[in-house]
Amino acid sequence: MSETANTNIKNTGLRGVAVADTKISFIDGEQGILMYRGYRIEELAGKSSFLETALLLLNEDLPDKGELDEFTRRVVEERKMPDFLAECLKNLPKQASPMDVLQATVPLLAAADPELTVETREANVRKAVRLISRLPAVVAAWHRVRNGLEPLPPDSGLPHAANFLWQLHGEKPDPGMARDLDVCMILHADHTFNASTFACREVVSTQAHMYAGIAAGIGALSGPLHGGANARVMKMLGEVESEKDIPAWVRRQLEQGKKIMGMGHAVYKTTDPRARILREISRRLGEKLGQPKWYELSVRVEEAAVAEFERKGLSTLKPNVDFYSASVYCMMGIPADLMTPLFALSRIAGWCAHIIEEKFADAQGKPELYRPESEYIGHYCGQMGCAYQAIEDRKPASQSPDV
Ligand SMILES: CC(C)(COP(=O)(O)OP(=O)(O)OC[C@H]1O[C@@H](n2cnc3c(N)ncnc32)[C@H](O)[C@@H]1OP(=O)(O)O)[C@@H](O)C(=O)NCCC(=O)NCCS
């Protein structure tokens, strides 16, 4: 009945294709280097705070003290969730996934933004402040509501990460643990053109507002090959807890065609620099809390997986950011299904920075609407198109699904 068009396009997932210029972050995947605005991630993790790093991403350089104080004041001021949103959360089915809830609340936060349609750079920075400030409140409130508890008001005396832990658990966190969480948030704050950032930028290239881009980014992050990997790592650690022979378990997984979650990366061909920092936090936290189990299990899985990958000639597969963040978050009392939302509460800084960069490119003017090509490989009956047959004249297709 028809010919099929030819194609030379392979499903490459755009690997190695540069789709835009950016001044926000840089990765050298061979050397394992990550920089935000020219600053190495190790330097920022050791010396900066999440809010200072967020401001670095939104602007072009580190803020001075006055700028950081003002930014912090505005984030603290915007922490309260709109009342109608708290009511909405109470009406949601309790089994709803926290990532779905987070994604669903973004358009509702848009509805409450007084500057939604103001498309200046300054107004978009203020929208970013509201998102950075309010998303943690949404995640914490949803966790409490689904457990039959009232959401807690923010504590204006607590720094950003500490306030999240307070609103989540209802206990003032240990300052050392809150600082560790702040460092985790720095490490997750940006990562060039990953799938979710690309989704944000693609959506706002249509001149849609920032919230529309962020909702798309959260959707992209939810997948197990992207942000969803940390929760899968935790599930894996739970599974291997009772295994006597972890190398044999790793071999079985690979023989069954399964992936070892938290291993491998689309860009890094060596250890992800964030994983090195998280590995140390995991070790230190385990020691401090007297719970070395999750760190030790992670190390044993890493060693077994890396040895097996090397045996198979896959020596570039090493731990990524999700591998050790799972044990760290677990020791902080973060349930597995809140690990990906927590990633989103950090990546929101990078997403907003990229959206602003996309909207207000540079002196050359606004960027183009993203509109890639595809290669058509479906039925083709020539330029006149296929003849439309009346339904009663059609023969059943051989591969019709059973209905
Ligand atoms: C992140 C990821 C999607 C990158 O995929 P990618 O760009 O295709 O990776 P590579 O090209 O380096 O993969 C090379 C080979 O290693 C395999 N591989 C990659 N990661 C693997 C893993 N974690 N476990 C087992 N095998 C893996 C691939 O299937 C591929 O094998 P093939 O050539 O037989 O198809 C992939 O490593 C993965 O799925 N990791 C687990 C999920 C995860 O941790 N995601 C979070 C990323 S931050």
Image (tube, grey):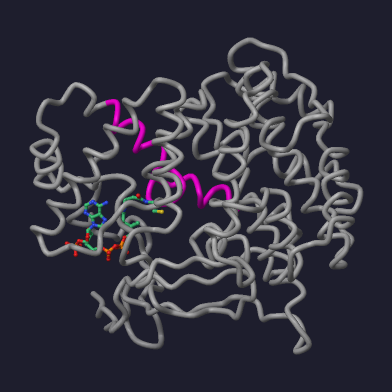
Vertical side of 78 occupied by 373: above or below: below
* The N terminus lies in quadrant: bottom left
Camera-side residue of 31 and 352 = 31
Horizontal side of 302 relative to 275 (left or right) equals left
The x and y percentages for residue 80 are 83, 31
Please, is residue 176 above or below residue 354 in the view? above
Above or below residue 166? Residue 110 is: below
Which corner quadrant of the figure contains ligand 1? bottom left
Main SS, magenta residues = helix
Visible residue check, residue 272: yes
Magenta span contains residue 192: no
Which segment is the magenta one? 216-238
In the image, 96 versus 232, the foreground residue is 232
Q: Locate residue 121, reporting x and y percent.
A: 84, 67
Residue 331 position in % (x across, y down)? 46, 26
Residue at (60, 31) in percent of width and height: 176
Query: In this rendering, would 393 be left or right of 144?
Result: left
Rendering quarter of residue 376: bottom left
Query: Residue at point 34% right, 38% down?
Result: 233
